Image (tube, rainbow, N blue to C red):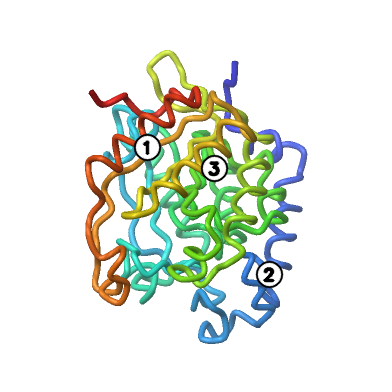
Amino acid sequence: MYNYPSYLELLQNGELVSRVESLYAMMQNCVLCPRLCNKNRGDGSKVICKAGDELTVSSAFAHYGEEPEITGFSGSGTVFLSHCTLRCVFCQNFEISHIGNGEIIPVERLAEILMELQNLGCHNINFVTPTHFSPHLVDAIHKAALKGLSIPIVWNSSGYESIDVIRLLDGIVDIYMPDMKFLDETSSRRYCKAPDYPDVAKKVLIEMNRQVGPLEVDDRGIARRGLLVRHLLMPGHLADTKNILEFISSKISVNTYVNIMDQYRPVQNTKRFSEIDHRITREEYLGAIEYASRLGLYKGFETVP
């Protein structure tokens, strides 16, 4: 049984410091995400995500709106990072992810925030859209661990990750919570300007699963370690949803926790894309759930009659 956050072992053997240094080195001419901008982050306008080299945080609080296994009874200690590497046209957090609203804070302050969230009783530290600030976040984990941080780390991402960064997170992240948005290259190109998203996400999810395996919960039902995949149903994209579910069941595991989400809603930017400028239908949702069940997937959703 998994009994402790994995980063504590790396703290003890000194490897955590080495990982921090490696991640900062990748940011110098930034290759932290698959965009491979290879530009200096000192001027955020040079990179696609628009993030500078200083940590920018939108908010940090005990969040009660995540999956029950993540929220638990006392909330998930959630840190929303500003900016995003993927920049989807249907983004629900436009002000944070596209515009970059937030406050620049030193890593030392983030380490204090992590301790404050732990002291509130939060079950985990949940980094939302963390990819482009990976060095700062692992640095903060190190600094907080020296002060007694001892709750699991959740990596809550778009699934558009550098495989090299994910390998550097091995033994640091306890719970991976990636999206799997598309396996269709045309959709990825049209809505995210990332035609490589399908190939990237497949490799990344396989690596995440290799590191942490299926989601494990304690005797209270609270997640301690493992992979939790989110898939947002898109209008008119049921065929792609089925391909995603097939990939998860055959290439990862039927024991994978899959949250098939039905909360898609059109936003200002989707007005340019009439095919997704409306909500999904009940038939699409039921079709996805039924297909997941047929494939043998069973964690993360309930069959709807």
Q: Is residue 248 left or right of residue 207?
A: left
Which one is earlier in the sequence, the residue at label 1 or at label 2?
Answer: 2
Q: Which residue is denoted by mark 3 in the rendering?
A: 147
Query: Hey, what amino acid is under mark 1?
Result: Ala
Q: Residue at x 32, y 69 (%)?
A: 94
Image quadrant for the N terminus? top right
Which mark's residue is nearer the viewer, 3 or 1? 1
Which element type, helix, strand or loop, lies under badge 1? Answer: helix
Query: Hey, what amino acid is under mark 2?
Result: Val
Residue 63 in view here: no
Give the spatial CA distance, label 3 vs label 1: 45 Å
Q: Position of residue 289 (x, y in %)?
A: 36, 32
Question: From what the image shows, is residue 259 above or below residue 234?
Answer: above
Query: Hey, what amino acid is under mark 3?
Result: Lys
Q: Which numbered disc covers residue 31?
A: 2
Q: Which residue is denoted by mark 1 in the rendering?
A: 288
Q: Residue at x 22, y 41 (%)?
A: 282
Which element type, helix, strand or loop, lies under badge 2? Answer: loop
